[in-house]
Amino acid sequence: MNLSTVIITHDEEKHIKKCLDSIGTHEVILVDNASTDQTVSIVQSNFPQAKIIRNKTNLGVAQARNQGIKEATGEYIMFLDADAELANDTINKLLEAMEQKPRAGIVAPKLIYPNGKLQYSCRRFPTFWNILSRGFLGESDSPNWYLMRDYDHKTPREVDWVMGACQLIRREVLNSIGLLDGGYFYGYEDVDFCWRALRKGWKVVYVPDAVAIHHYQRRSARGGIFNRLKWSHFSSAMRFLLKKNFS
């Protein structure tokens, strides 16, 4: 299987072993964003075959994933969050979806919480107002159309974008649109990447038969208005809206 998986870590000792246990034996590039816990030691001890890039500072998601992409050799590249675990046969189901749709450039599984509840991980492109409502009021106040609550999440379909917690990407997509926009530190790099792919004629496909458990820590949602990641996330949202509406 000509597949490379890129995983970003920052203090993920609680989740990283289960994540790596779930993905099999293909190429893994782990980019560590200055962890202060035992994350790297756990990987070195249990998965010596993994390529590890250690950053002295936290470079954020987009830049770290770009580091991993540059080291990847696979025809397909999978982004996987360190707090996600793939169900059996998920990779094969995603690859099958690629084969069935030659212009499918990005495919993603259904994400569920550890308790089995659905995560709304495929979405329509956001507007300014639902960014505000989601960021400061919570997911429950996000508009139904944005989270695609009108969709049964049981049949495969083309969508605007899928969460970067798990994405399988054709190498040709990267060749045609380039790397992730490194100007995003935390959040919206996945929205931006899907948007750019769609502009080049690629399809983004949600594949609910493939499943991943995602602990979905939402670090930007903690600590109220004083959380620095919340403001970084909001800044990224504004960056995306400006690019989408004025570029």
Image: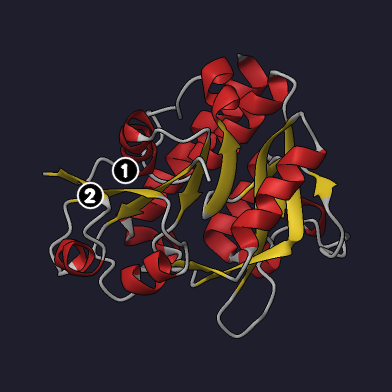
Q: Position of residue 178 (x, y in %)?
A: 49, 20
Residue 190 to residue 28: above or below: above
Check disc 2: other Cα within 10 Å, few if <14, some if 14-19, many if 20+: many
Q: Residue at x 60, y 30 (%)?
A: 241
Outermost front residue: 1
Horizontally, residue 40 falls left or right of residue 162, namely left
Check disc 1: other Cα within 10 Å, few if <14, some if 14-19, many if 20+: some
* Dot 2 amino acid type: Asn
Between residue 187 and residue 85, name the one nearer to us: 85
Residue at which label 1 appears = 60
Between residue 21 and residue 142, name the one nearer to us: 21
Q: Taking the image as drawn, is residue 188 in sight? A: no
Q: Position of residue 111 (x, y in %)?
A: 63, 65
Between residue 195 and residue 67, name the one nearer to us: 67
Q: Residue at x 51, y 46 (%)?
A: 78
Outermost bottom residue: 115
The secondary element bearing badge 1 is classed as loop
Of mark 2 and mark 1, the one earlier in the sequence is 2
Q: Are the residues at dot 2 and dot 1 in contact (C-beta closer than 8 Å)? A: yes
Horizontally, residue 110 falls left or right of residue 88, namely right
* Dot 1 amino acid type: Gly
Q: Which mark is residue 33?
A: 2
Horizontally, residue 15 falls left or right of residue 90, namely left
The secondary element bearing badge 2 is classed as strand
Q: Residue at x 45, y 62 (%)?
A: 24
Residue 49 to residue 14: above or below: above
Q: How many marks?
A: 2
